[in-house]
Amino acid sequence: MDQNAPSDTLLFVDTTDQIFSEHRFDTPNAELATGPDNPPWNGWIALSVWLISVFLVVVVPSVVVLAYVAPMRGSLGGQEALIEFVKNDPTAVILQVIAILPVHLLTILLAWAVVTRLKTYPFREMLGWNSGGMRWWHYVLILIGIFSLSAVVMSNFPEADNDLLRIVRSSRTAVFVLAALATLTAPLVEEVVYRGILYSAFQRTFGVTFAVVIVTALFALVHFPQYWPSYSTLFLLTLLSLILTMVRVRTGNLLPCVILHTIFNGIQSAVLIAEPYFPTPAVDPAQVAAAILLFFVN
């Protein structure tokens, strides 16, 4: 027996280490080129980015609106009166909506730092900034399907009152600010966090199926308290999240998700802005738009 030859035990240990290193929650696969499906960040970092983004959405608007109501708190009475004031005062509502802008800016800055490792890797290349085979008519077909299903569901199971409908009713200024954020910043920020950072890390560690399920679930979970117990809206929002995630799977790129998300939000925003100029049908399109749009703003 060759004394210099590696023993069977050592070979087994080396092989086992190699297998498990490729599936650890925090270890990139060195055999694959760094990119959207083998990102330079790990699952723990991806989960941390998501948690921080949720924290910012909760804390920043709260701090802004509390600063506004602080001087008048003594005249508002108890806590219940204060909550009602924050919900219904037009200025308070607008401030809460505007506060989403710094949330989006901070989130995308954090995402940039993670994705690029502070300029070590190119941002767009790590996320996948190509069409991935998506053609213009793919977007059209997907949007027609989404809006058709939404109309059917909402007509049979009307949407209950929710936060976005309250915002829409508060003032036209709030509507315009909301529409701008939903179209210009929300699609990019949401997609980078969920279909970009989260999905990329999870699919490498746990596989595509698990990644699709967990990303779709996390995306819906963040908005679950806002819509419970409106089952129809929760169903539609979860379905929309699933569709966007499947586009990421099918194309291997984040760009088609951002484009689809932006077009979708833009159409919803246009409906909200134009709604006062059209007669109100049996099923108010503004309510349908509002029910879906809030899901993609915060």
Image (cartoon, rainbow, N blue to C red):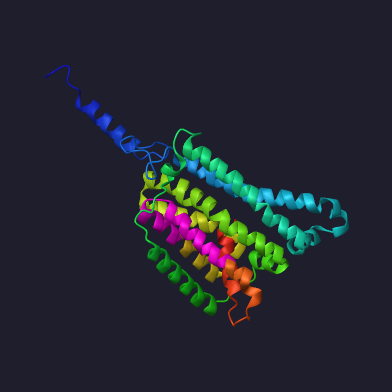
User: Where's the C terminus, which quadrant?
Assistant: bottom right
- The residue at the point 58 percent across, 47 percent down is 53
Residue closest to the eye, 203 or 129: 129
Q: Position of residue 246 (x, y in %)?
A: 40, 58
Residue 163 lies left or right of residue 74; in this view the side is left
For residue 187, above or below residue 236? above
Which residue is outermost to the left? 1
Q: Is residue 255 magenta?
A: yes
User: Where's the N terminus, which quadrant?
Assistant: top left
Residue closest to the eye, 226 or 69: 69
- The residue at the point 50 percent across, 62 percent down is 263
Residue closest to the eye, 15 or 278: 278
Q: Position of residue 110 (x, y in %)?
A: 56, 41
Residue 190 lies left or right of residue 71; in this view the side is left
For residue 46, above or below residue 14? below
- Looking at the image, can residue 213 be seen? no
| Label tally | 0
- The residue at the point 45 percent across, 44 percent down is 124
Q: Position of residue 178 (x, y in %)?
A: 64, 60
Q: Which residues are magenta?
A: 242-269
- The residue at the point 64 percent across, 52 percent down is 100
Q: Is residue 91 magenta?
A: no
Which residue is outermost to the bottom? 282
Q: Position of residue 147 (x, y in %)?
A: 48, 71
Q: Predominant secondary structure in magenta?
A: helix
- Looking at the image, can residue 179 be seen? yes
Which residue is outermost to the top? 3
Quarter assignment of residue 91: bottom right
